[in-house]
Image (cartoon, rainbow, N blue to C red):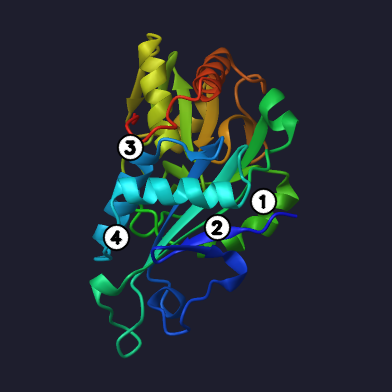
Amino acid sequence: MSESYCFLNGKIIPEKDASLPLSDIGILRAFSVYDGIASFEGKPFLFQNHYERFVRSATALGIAIPYSNEELYEALCEMLQKSHLTERANIRAVATGGTTIAGIEFKPENSTIFFTAVNFVPLPKEFYETGAKLITHEYKREFPEYKTVNYITGVLLQKRRKEAGAVEILYVKDGHVYECATSNIFIVKNGELVTPHKDVLPGITKKLVCVLAMKEGIVCREGDVSVDDLFAAEEVFITSSFKDIVPIVEIDGKMIKDGKKGLKTRQIMSLVQNYLDSRQGLDLQTRV
């Protein structure tokens, strides 16, 4: 089995040799941000988009990212090659505030930055072929437009998700639909794609879907989505860097339309898969 490497504070080292101080504020106070990036053929996918989101999340918390996009792109390519992750892989990026001051403060310039990667493990084929289920939970993330490491609610709900045979947990609150624990959501309403726009993470795959759809003449817009809209939708699907496009045919035991993967969802799945197969988005210049 190949040895796994990681990027830690400017160095690429074997993962088994990596460590963080117990006084890191990311450990003591969960004060850190996160990003998830797909890679293909040993290169991060749409890295410019992910880098910008990573920096935006870190900046919101006052955490410094002391590396340029070029430096991190080259480092990740080297890390993936050393780990022999030359097929599809999942990269996880974390930035913390570094060593604490008196257990509660930090210096922005003392940030801890690390990246790890593992082989991509796809969801069961039937989720893509015949559709998957969601369960809902009344919740809205704190700092929802930034990708922090606060996944406490999502982690605690995994047992319930598995018992329900669901692929994801959908966060709703006060009659509004927001996002899933690790995915964005779209509905099809009057033949148009609609995705929540407020108090949600600006997903990279979500953005790719909108760009590709509009090029094909499919209307795609961001707007408010109510729970009533959700259950009245013609189609529903979710998007994620680690899942791509997953059709949703049932939510909380209620069937969406006729319970089958819809035409618009099929079109979007095909558009995204063709984009992935073309290996666009693997160079540093490409962004959506």
Q: Is residue 123 above or below residue 266?
A: below
* Quadrant of image for the N terminus: bottom right
Q: 165 left or right of 16?
A: right
Q: Which of marks 1 and 3 is nearer the N terminus?
A: 1
Question: Badge 3, how many Cα within 10 Å: few under 14, some, many 20+?
Answer: some
User: Which label lies toward us, 3 or 4?
Assistant: 4
Q: Which of marks 3 and 4 is nearer the N terminus?
A: 4
Residue assigned mark 1: 161
Tell me whether the residue at label 3 lies in contact with that at label 4, contact meaning CB atoms closer than 8 angstroms.
no
Residue assigned mark 3: 197
Q: 258 left or right of 231?
A: right
Residue assigned mark 4: 65
Structural distance between the alpha carbons of marks 4 and 1 = 35 Å
Secondary structure at badge 3 equals loop
Three-letter amino acid code at disc 2? Gly
Three-letter amino acid code at disc 4? Ile
Structural distance between the alpha carbons of marks 2 and 3 = 20 Å
Structural distance between the alpha carbons of marks 3 and 4 = 26 Å
Residue 123: quarter of image: top right
Q: In this view, does 71 lie above or below 125?
A: below
User: Which label lies toward us, 4 or 1?
Assistant: 4
Secondary structure at badge 1 equals helix
Three-letter amino acid code at disc 1? Arg
Three-letter amino acid code at disc 3? His
Q: Which of marks 2 and 1 is nearer the N terminus?
A: 2
Secondary structure at badge 4 equals loop
Which of 182/160 is in front? 182
Structural distance between the alpha carbons of marks 1 and 3 = 25 Å
Structural distance between the alpha carbons of marks 2 and 1 = 10 Å
Q: Where is residue 245 in the image (x, y as percent from the top left)?
A: 56, 29
Tell me whether the residue at label 1 lies in contact with that at label 3, contact meaning CB atoms closer than 8 angstroms.
no
Q: Where is residue 176 in the image (x, y as percent from the top left)?
A: 40, 42
